[in-house]
Amino acid sequence: MAKDIRHLFTSWRLLLLVGILAGALAGISSCGSDEPDMKVGYYLSVSSSEAYMASSEDEGQGTMSDTQHGNVLYTTITRMKNAVQNAYPTPDTKGADVAVLMACDKIYRDYKNMYGEYEKNTICVVKIMRTKLDDGIVVGSRTLTTYSFGALPPDKDHVQ
């Protein structure tokens, strides 16, 4: 019986030693990376079947040149870009996913409350992208969320 207890004690110590070594190796490999911590960035990826950019003359007034719906899209997308910048003004290694998403979600909800019932057929998709930056160059990105905007009837007054 004493021999069984010694064997059990020796096996237990051996298992503990293997566990400690495995943990130490995992810690060393994660700390010894030559790759520096990359900064996080955010941007809007916009895909639209309708023009939404303003001309340089219109930009100061925040209006759109060709279509009324373009004006609504331009204003909403501009507000979202500004919200991302305000929620995350200085890039760091952690990011601010929640703050960025909350800011853009509020703008999207405002848009949907005003125009959601008039929309039909998605014409614009906006994605909030989270990126990893290496000296200001995007080396990886992923979509945090996607917003869809539909066409509005031309007879509605859409000035925000």
Image (tube, helix red, strand yellow):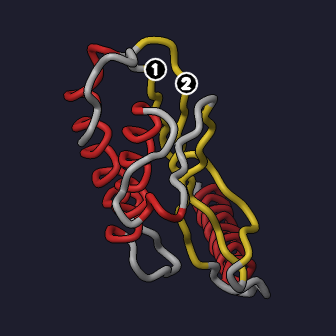
Image quadrant where residue 119 sits: top left
The residue at 40%/33% (across/down) is 68
Give me the C-alpha separation between circle 2 and circle 1.
6 Å
Which residue: 33% across, 68% down?
87
Q: Is residue 87 above or below residue 37?
A: above
User: Disc 1 marks which amino acid?
Assistant: Ala
- The structure residue drawn at horizontal position 74% and vertical position 87%, both measured from the top left corner, is 32
Image position, residue 23 (x, y; %)? 64, 72
* 78, above or below 127, in the image: below
- Give the answer, above or below, for where 128 lies relative to 87: above
Q: Of 127 and 27, which appears nearest the observer?
A: 127
Q: Which residue is mark 2?
A: 123
Tell me where residue 36 appears, x and y as whole percent: 69, 86
Q: Which mark is residue 76?
A: none
Q: Secondary structure at mark 1?
A: strand
- Which one is in front, 126 or 142? 126
Give residue 76's quadrant in the image.
Answer: top left
Q: Could you say which is closer to the camera, residue 30 or residue 51? A: 51
Looking at the image, is 56 positioned above or below residue 107? below
Please name the residue shown 54% across and 57% down the image. Answer: 55
Report whether 31 appears left or right of 85. right
| Left or right of 84, for residue 47 | right
What kind of residue is marked 2?
Ile
Which residue is outermost to the right? 34
Secondary structure of the residue carrying tag 2 is: strand
Q: In this rendering, would 118 be left or right of 34?
A: left
Residue 85 image point, x, y percent? 40, 70
- Rate crowding at label 1 as few (under 14), some (14 to 19) or many (20 or more) other CA atoms within 10 Å: some
* Residue nearest the observer in this picture, 120 or 102: 120
Q: What residue would you read off at disc 1?
A: 151
